[in-house]
Every structure is written in C-alpha cells, then in structure tokens.
Amino acid sequence: MPCLIGVRVRPILYDAARPPSAAIPRKDTAMANRRGRPTLLTDEITRRVCAHIGKGIALKPAFEAEGISERVGHDWLAKGEDGVKPFDSFSAAVTRARARGEIALHCRVLKGGPGSDGARFILERRVRERYGRVDRVEMAGHDGGAIQIDADLRAASMIRKDPAASKALHDALGLAVAGATE
C-alpha cells in the first residue's frame, strides 16, 4: 500500500441509523446527466422578450434588448419547437407574442393616422403572405391583343452585331414604350 506523506486523511463517520450509501450526497439524476452551462432562460426573460415582441418589435432587437444574442434566442426557439423543456414554454410564449404584435400593427393600420404607414410597411415585409403587396404588370400587343414573340435567335444575333440595327431597334422600343404610357 503506497504511503502518502503529508496528506491528512479525515475519517468518514457514518450514522448508525443510515446505511453508508445514504451518507454520500448525490445530485439529482436529471441535473447529473446535463452537460454544459445552465440556461439563462427564466420566466422573467420570457416575459420581457414577449412584451417587446407583443408591441410589434422584431425578434433580434427583442432578444438583444434583454441581453440575449440573436443566435441564442433562435436556438431556444428551435429547442422549444422540438419539445425540450423549458424552451417549449418559451417558444409557445413567443408564438403568442408574435400574434399579439401582428394584431397591434394591424390595428394601427386600420386606425390610420400617424404611424399607420410604418405599421403597414412592417406588415408587408414581415408577414408577406398575408399583407404583402401584389404588383402586377400586364403587357399587351397592338390593339390589346397578345404580344407576338419571334424566337429566331439568328436575327437577334445579327442585330447585336450591327450597331445601326441595334440603335434602330432601341429607338423603336423606346417609341413603343412611350406610346404605351400615353
């Protein structure tokens, strides 16, 4: 048996009423299996982030206002969508806050007055599938008929090679466009 010089050994005293295995303090098994830093996500952080989002603020500034990086905030949301606790309640709260924020912006647009154009702008870009603008340009040929497209590539190649023909085509198109807008 090796001899340890200069090492003080304390005797382990056991209570006669408890078995020796109960004398050793053990961590909770759920906590013992976790690795890495403990999460910074708390109910207070969730409440404050959701308060910002509920006013119509985007995710990035809402996270950063509470000292959370955008990457970490999106990681929390992804874990919540996968059902990992406590991130699942965070993800659900953010989803509800997004809906409240959209409603707040929508009400501001309907109310009109100052800020309604800004709210409309945000909705058009953030929730494009519901509020996005649909701009369509319709082109028609002579007398409102269909536009005839000639697919002869040799003619296009010859026009590109001849500067005079290219200029004539450019001028003709300019006149056609100017006539269409009048």
Image: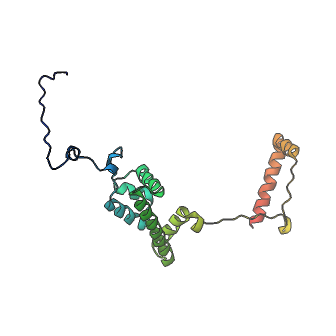
Marks counted in the figure total 0
Q: Is residue 38 visible?
A: no
Q: Place residue 156 in its image quadrant.
A: top right
The front one of 86 and 152 is: 86
The front one of 151 and 89 is: 89
Identify the residue at image location x=54%, y=64%: 127
Q: Is residue 169 visible?
A: yes
Q: Is residue 148 above or below residue 8?
A: below
Q: Is residue 108 above or below residue 179?
A: below
Identify the residue at image location x=42%, y=67%: 54
**Quadrant the C terminus occupies:** bottom right
Identify the residue at image location x=37%, y=61%: 49
**Quadrant the N terminus occupies:** top left
Identify the residue at image location x=11%, y=30%: 8
Where is residue 128 shown, x and y percent of the image? 57, 63
Relative placement, left or right, of 3 versus 169 is left
Relative placement, left or right, of 72 versus 179 is left
Furthest residue toward bottom: 111
The front one of 33 and 64 is: 33
Relative placement, left or right, of 176 versus 61 is right
Where is residue 41 shown, x and y percent of the image? 35, 55
State the scheme by which the image is colored: rainbow
Where is residue 142 shown, x and y percent of the image? 85, 65
Where is residue 121 shown, x and y percent of the image? 52, 65
